[in-house]
Amino acid sequence: MPATTPAKGRGRRRAILGAVAAIGAAVLLAGCSTSSGATGSGGDYEKAAEDTKATLTYAVWDENQVKAIKANLEGFNEEYPDIKVNVDVTPFASYWTKLQTQGSSDTLPDLFWMNGPNFQLYAANGKLAPITGEVKAGAIDPAKYSSALNDLYTYDKTQYGVPKDFDTIGVWMNKALFEKAGVAMPSKDWTWDDFQKTGAELSEKLKADGAYGAAGGMDGQTTYYDTIFQAGGSVVGDDGTKSMYDTKASEAGLQFWTDLIASGASPSIKQLTDTTADQWFTSGKLAMYQGGSWFRSALTGTDLEKDVVVYPLPKGKEQATVIHGVSNVVSANTKHKAAAQALQVYLAGKQAQQQQGDMGAVIPAYDGTQSAFTKTMPDADLQVFLDAVDYAKPLPVSKNTAAWNTLETSLLPSAFDGSTPVDDVAKELAQKMDAALAKEQ
């Protein structure tokens, strides 16, 4: 998650932290036997009786969402008064370490939050109950969620997770800096070339103020993953066994950021390591920040809020954005499966999702419940993030995402700072990533 919004965002920085924890989890879980009925296309489901008695543990990592969760639970208990739910909040920094320990001893919480980078590890090792039964019974309708989010929580053609929220990427624009620089706001139907030229012009005219037009960075979800997809490329092959970094399309997606920095439109990679792009923007030193929908919480109530408007990402060969979201999953070994599935189903429904959105906790994943999000900054056009779902691509993940996240972090800076040709870096990254993916098979 972005460092400036650790509690609310569902972005890549947090995803990386979770994936790093998965390295240890891979060791702990790899030797565990697959739980009966936990994998494959099966998955039984029988609606829990209204008088079902159980005490469930629901594990989450965001204290800021607990108020909305408890409001959801009040509604759930109107239907199931004898199912008690204890909300277990563990800070994200230690959430995955705790979860991997529970996974290795088959003591996972009854229901818990899952993210994309860690999902495949737990699904492949039989730790999650599929939602096949709920879907067949009509209790959960995947059509109510983004297909990209459904894909993110599907493993071996079986879906395990129910998306609870989502985030997409847009460009946050500081209108006051455009006005100060005397640069006209571009059309929202803009291209890569428009973005590059506007960024360079802004940087030139704001140079005396120490401000920049745009910014790159090492956060793949908000930068180079998006441009790779926009160039028609991908990060991981469809079968999850090969890196796609050494394809021409993916190299073009990386070159976009190398060119932006070389033109002076963006701070250098060293500068962005010391001060991240979101911090440049909130300090009034960046006119265009390519960031996630979660960034809203860093702006509401600030002096900067009145000057901000959101643009869709500029179009390359195609229009694309990364999408990610947290999912509610049931432990394959829960002793209270019917009760846990009842809660999973309730939280996936329109009433609970609408309540989450109305309370400002998240952008709910259920189609048609997101309007409250756009009203939190009515003049900023937050609708851009909702419209982006139509052309969104799932956050790139694999069974051990952390292994190649580390490779990206170590190798890509030399491409972005211009010290090594992009195609050379991409080739080396692909070779090493292939080796990491081979170990997952």
Image: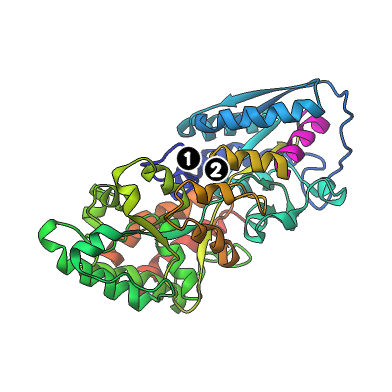
Residue at 46 percent across and 77 percent down: it is: 249
The residue indicated by pointer 1 is: 8
Residue at 77 percent across and 43 percent down: it is: 38
- The front one of 432 and 358 is 358
Q: Quadrant of residue 76?
A: top right
Specify the label residue 90 is tagged with: none
- The front one of 359 and 396 is 359
Assess whether mark 2 and mark 1 are in contact (beta carbons under 8 angstroms). Answer: yes
Question: What is the three-letter code of the residue carrying label 2?
Answer: Val
| Left or right: 73, with 266 as reference point | right
Colour mapping used in the image: rainbow
Query: Callout 2: 10 Å neighbours few (<14), some, many (20+)?
Result: many
Residue 336 included in the magenta stretch of the image: yes
Residue 157 included in the magenta stretch of the image: no
| Left or right: 269, with 398 as reference point | left
Specify the label residue 362 is tagged with: 2
Q: Position of residue 101 (x, y in %)?
A: 58, 29
Q: Position of residue 193 (x, y in %)?
A: 34, 78
Q: In the structure shown, which secondary structural element does the residue marked by tag 1 occupy?
A: loop
Considering the image in quadrants, where does the C terminus appear?
A: bottom right
Helix, strand or loop for the magenta stretch, by majority:
helix
Q: Quadrant of residue 143?
A: bottom right
Q: In the structure shown, which secondary structural element does the residue marked by tag 2 occupy?
A: loop
The region drawn magenta spans 334-349
Q: Position of residue 55 (x, y in %)?
A: 75, 20
Q: Position of residue 171 (x, y in %)?
A: 39, 61
